[in-house]
Image: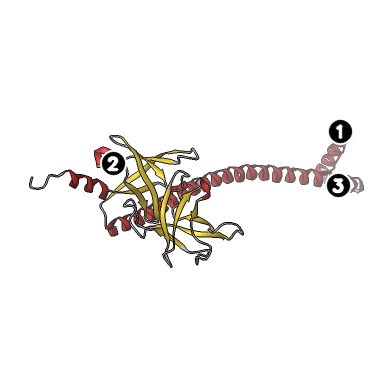
Amino acid sequence: MLALLILCLLIFSSTLAGRYGIFHQATLEILGPVQSGISRIGTGACRLWDNYVNLLNTREENHQLKLLLLASEEKLAKYREAYTTYLHLEKELEFRQKVDFPPLTARVIGKDPSYWFQTIIVDRGENEGVIKGMVALTSKGIVGQVIHVSANYCKILLANAPSSAIDVVVQKNRVRGILKGTGANGYILNYVLKNADVAKGDRIVTAGIGGVFASGIPVGTVSAVHRKKRGMFLEIEVEPAVDFQKLEFLHLNLSLQQSVISEKIVPGG
């Protein structure tokens, strides 16, 4: 460090004297690379600092962009859900306007997950005219039947419950059978003879026998047909027309309530 200082003084003194001799030139040759190195180091340090500052700014911008993207994705998900709900309600409204019975729309508010008695609870009860035995359905088909009623709520036994049984026919040829629920696995169509023309994809509808379900209401579609060596009946699996796991709204058929009221009216006043 001292030697560098002495060299600088010598250069300065020689410059003042107006002489640029061999010593001055040699000194410049020595100090030139040093100054160049110092200059490069200084320039590199400035660039490194600028890059660091830019990196910090980029990280902050990236963080803000991620927050904006997340907020946009949340909004998009809400819009999609709202649009899906709108389409579903539009279809149910169209169904409600076309049915030939007085419908009462209800919202599903609870579900009993037990295997044998699969039920749901809806927000309609005696105050809205609901009585035990009423049929519940959607635009896609049969949901079940009311089994308990309170003032503002009622419980519906789902059609796919193992304790449920529905008289049905194969729509294409009117072959009859009894549809038994199997819980999450859908239905099994019983008592169809082996020589019956039943195939995968055939639609199953209500037979209208017994006065509970009107005829022709969709129940499901044949998903598999098994012809066992023993026995005289086919083993037929049926996929439900209604997705019981996604039920949100349904319609109660008020025809039963009106028929009960009419039976209580005495002729002639």
Circle 1 sits on which residue?
1
Which quadrant would the N terminus be assigned to in this image?
top right
Which residue is more in the foreground, 20 or 146? 146
**Real-space CA distance between mark 1 and mark 3, rounded to the nearest whole angstrom:** 16 Å
Q: Please, what secondary structure does the residue beneath circle 2 have?
A: loop
Question: Which one is earlier in the sequence, the residue at label 3 or at label 2?
Answer: 3
Q: Could you classify mark 1 by the number of other residues whose Cα lies within 10 Å: few (under 14), some (14-19), or many (20 or more)?
A: few
CB contact under 8 Å: marks 1 and 3? no
Question: Which one is earlier in the sequence, the residue at label 1 or at label 3?
Answer: 1
Q: Position of residue 230 (x, y in %)?
A: 60, 57
The numbered dot on residue 230 is none
Q: Amino acid at mark 3?
A: Leu
Q: Amino acid at mark 1?
A: Met
Q: Could you classify mark 2 by the number of other residues whose Cα lies within 10 Å: few (under 14), some (14-19), or many (20 or more)?
A: many
Q: Could you classify mark 3 by the number of other residues whose Cα lies within 10 Å: few (under 14), some (14-19), or many (20 or more)?
A: some
The numbered dot on residue 131 is 2
Please state which of the two labelled residues, at mark 1 or mark 3, is closer to the viewer: 1
Q: Amino acid at mark 2?
A: Ile
Please state which of the two labelled residues, at mark 1 or mark 2, is closer to the viewer: 2
Q: Please, what secondary structure does the residue beneath circle 1 have?
A: loop
Question: Which one is earlier in the sequence, the residue at label 1 or at label 2?
Answer: 1
User: Could you tell me which residue is drawn at 29 percent across and 58 percent down?
Assistant: 99
Please state which of the two labelled residues, at mark 3 or mark 2, is closer to the viewer: 2
Q: Position of residue 137 (x, y in %)?
A: 36, 51
**Real-space CA distance between mark 3 and mark 2, rounded to the nearest whole angstrom:** 109 Å
Which residue is more in the foreground, 72 or 82? 82
In the picture, measured across the screen, residue 165 lies left or right of residue 208, that is: right
Circle 3 sits on which residue?
28
